[in-house]
Amino acid sequence: MRGNQFRQGAVKEVAMSERARTIDTLLDERRTFAPSPEFLSKARVTDQSLFEAAAADPEGFWAEQAKKYVSWYKPFDTVLEWDLPFAKWFVGGELNVSYNCLDRHVEAGKGEKVAYHFEGEQGDTRAITYAELLSAVCRLANALKKLGIKRGDRVGIYMPMIPELPMAMLACARIGAAHSVVFGGFSAEAVRDRMNDAAAVAIITADEGWRRGGLVPLKRNVDEACEDSPTVKNVVVVRRTGNEVPMTEGRDHWYHDLVEGESDTCEPEHMESEDLLFTLYTSGTTAKPKGIKHTTAGYHLYAMFTHDLVFDIQPDTVYWCAADVGWVTGHSYIVYGPLGNGVTSVMYEGTPDFPAKDRWWSIIEKYGVTVLYCAPTAIRTFMKWGPEFPQKHDLSSLRLLGTVGEPINPEAWMWYREHIGGDRVPVVDTWWQTETGGIMIAPLPGVTVLKPGSATKPLPGIGAAVVDEAGNQVALGGGGYVTLTKPWPGMLRGIWGDDERYRETYWNRFGTQYFAGDGARIDEDGYFWFMGRVDDVMNVAGHRISTAEVESALVDHPAVAEAAVVAKSDPETGQAISAFVTLRAGYEGSTELIAELRNHVAKLIGPIAKPKWIAFTPDLPKTRSGKIMRRLLRDIAENRKLGDTTTLADSSIVADLQRRATEEEAKEQ
Ligand code: PRX
């Protein structure tokens, strides 16, 4: 009985009607795709042996992988110290991640192999070999050291998608400074808050970035952030667009001036396994972003291991992850996974429709890309544009496709397979989070029978479950909360500066299981079908945005008294942000104010957090204890056919809100 009750509860709680659509579709989703003989003829893993070895002796399994994938200066003595919820992996070991990404490939004779085929939005290109990347990283590492940046410091990175971005990350890793990359689409305020939280000593940025032909004022944003970031003593600026930007004497340095004349060798620091490699901020249920901590050995091993197996890496793989390095997907699958594995990648700076809607497909044809990894939101956009754009290009080099970031609906999965994959290549839907460091639930393409819309099952060595409120696994066929049941090398080591929040967010709800915040159904074959977040975190185009963060940005505007933000399902971005706003006395709702509020949110957080729809209402529906009844607001946002951007609160919305709040309260009593 409990399971049934939960199922109803879960369906109510899982934000968005996306879930309703997904569940409906899932019920009749019976198509399966076994690995094809063509794929199997080259596949790296074709049997259950890894799953069996990991199940038989988890620590022995990870020890073996750590020896296989990582080059150590000093071997580790202990595989795992697990003092729940704090894990230490490969204790006693010493290594350097930049050595593992660069030097060892050059030493092995692969210095001339291309690490990145860089494609600028404007059409400029650079092929950077492993040897060239190594010298660039060493020169920058030496320059950073001369600025006084040292092991244990934190360095902010706020850059466009250009090769200097991975170079900056690797230079930090080389000298033992932890980086904190802030997505280039975030605002000055977001940069400032993150730099202050981490007490960063420097920021590496660019003059500007290109985006859809326009300019992103990165340096100006950094200047604004620095006005209020007292710990930042140095700013390093890459010249990208070449436009004039102000430079502050003594604090700001041109990247090209700094590295000129620097030696192209730099002895890597010998780091301990558990030294901090980076922090990356992600949204939770409160307004303050969490600095997720990842350490050296476990994270890097896990990025390489998962990249190698899930993407079935071959010596001639040309791999393209179309995410931004500013998100965890880019950290693990543009930088640390592929470079650790010595793979050739494509890195693209711009948007898919610049200068035309076939840009991605022309890139695949040009470089002979064999593996493409992107987000469902991109696939839905391509579906909308139509198959004629990919059809213009020869995509026959592709042998594997991947997706990440949000649930993929079966229609989009099928479209991707058919129109991009020529109906012949596997599509791997990969579920994971900033916190997990790498892919957790995904197919092994030479082993797993695929079902469109399912991320399938946990990878070897990973324990995941779908549980009810009490933390008990639901029966196959049931739905519930996703938990992770065993420590894994790539797991977060906590939240920067806030152990209590780490416990509270991930470990309080189910005791010994990590609570992921997602809802899922598990089918008769044990396959996971993700349904979205169950907490107050939205997933907009694959980006996690907290309702609380957008609310506090709205309330920051002088006209706003109170705001409630909910997600509304959206055919392209998965979810879109809807805001209900009450105004302070003396202010009137207007189309201009809506535009102003949207811009205000963009300024405080970044354009991705702009509400798509804002309604003014004299009151928000609340319980007696003063809690906003979000479920009601969600229903209203979902049920009404709301226009693209705006609808002023008309009396019917307000009346509806009030009527339903009253009904709800009556039910509670
Ligand atoms: O809700 C899940 C969704 O994205 C969340 C993690 O977001 P973030 O930390 O920004 O990392 C995104 C890239 C790994 C998850 O809690 N999510 C991610 N991948 C999938 C997904 N939901 C369904 N299916 C996926 N494949």
Image: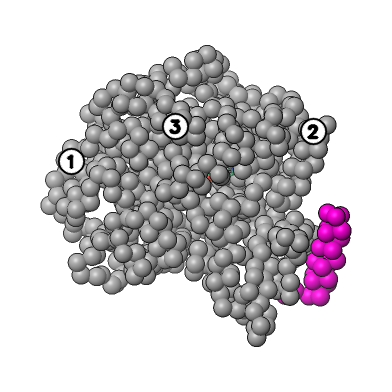
Q: Position of residue 372 (x, y in %)?
A: 50, 40
Q: Earlier in the sequence, mark 2 or mark 3?
A: 2
Of helix, strand and loop, which one carries label 1?
loop
Cβ of disc 2 within 8 Å of ligand 1?
no
First in sequence: mark 1 vs mark 2 = 2
The CA distance from mark 1 to mark 2 is 60 Å
Q: Name the quadrant of the N terminus.
A: top right
The answer to whether residue 171 is above or below residue 397 is below
Residue visible at 16% across and 40% down?
265
Q: Is residue 668 magenta?
A: yes
Residue that badge 3 annotates: 87
Question: Are the residues flagged by discs 1 and 2 in contact, CB closer than 8 Å?
Answer: no
Quadrant (top left, top right, bottom left, bottom right) of the C terminus: bottom right
Label drawn at residue 644: none
Q: Quadrant of residue 217?
A: bottom left
- The span from disc 2 to disc 3 (Cα, nearest Å) is 33 Å
Three-letter amino acid code of the residue under disc 1: Cys
SS assignment for the magenta stretch, majority: helix
Give the number of callouts. 3
